[in-house]
Image (spheres, helix red, strand yellow):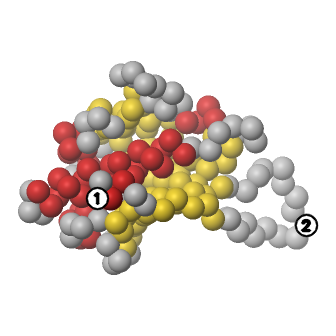
Amino acid sequence: MEYLHGHVYETPVKVFAPAKVLSCVPPPTRKVVETPIQCSTGSFYKFFKKQASLLPSVCGAVVQTVGLADGNRSWVNTVGSRKVIEILAAESCSDTAEKFKYVVEAVDDRSRKITYKVLEGSLLQLYDSFTVTLQVTSASTAKWTVEYVKKDPCSEDPDFYLQLFRTINATVDIYLRSNDY
């Protein structure tokens, strides 16, 4: 069960703007969760880049469905590709789910990093923007970074989703090791 143990920390986001420009937009907040993985880091990254359609069968308790959106015909995550994902709902102890549409904003194969931006879904009722980055490090860790701007300063932080990423990391790691990827 040590897969579920990881580190969650918050890092400040530096925003640089010209000195004369004043803005009422708050800077984004960044939270990170890192978990160790024992499978090949290349396999773990490849799973999220090319095989994300398997998430419902691998992590069915968390991810109910994944689908292609807006005319996309490939499951490979490339810049601009759009998908829809249905996950366990934050407020639920029952079998309800939340559906989100996202776009892949960046893919960096060299540093094994994929950045996703939420385009539609209930998260955008609480946040002006919500971006998630997965990076698989050479130190055998899977690191999810969530960057968001709250619509209301009193809104909750998205800690629930960080816990989901921790569970997904552990489950995918076990799946890849047990299937010799």
Q: Residue furthest front?
A: 1
In the image, what residue occupies the spot 50% across and 41% down? 160
Q: Residue furthest left?
A: 180
- Mark 1 → mark 2, Cα distance in angstroms: 41 Å
* Count of numbered labels shown in the rendering: 2
Residue closer to the observer: 106 or 37: 37
Residue closer to the observer: 2 or 71: 2
The residue singled out by tag 1 in the image is: 49
Q: Secondary structure at mark 1?
A: helix
Q: What type is the residue that disc 2 sits on?
A: Lys
In the image, what residue occupies the spot 20% across and 55% down? 174
In the image, what residue occupies the spot 30% across and 43% down? 72
User: Residue 56, how many percent across, how many down?
Assistant: 24, 38
> For mark 2, does the 10 Å Cα neighbourhood hold few (<14), some (14 to 19), or many (20 or more) residues?
few
* Image quadrant occupied by the C terminus: bottom left
Q: Secondary structure at mark 2?
A: loop
The residue singled out by tag 2 in the image is: 20
In the image, what residue occupies the spot 29% across and 65% down? 37
User: Residue 133, how many percent across, how many down?
Assistant: 46, 59
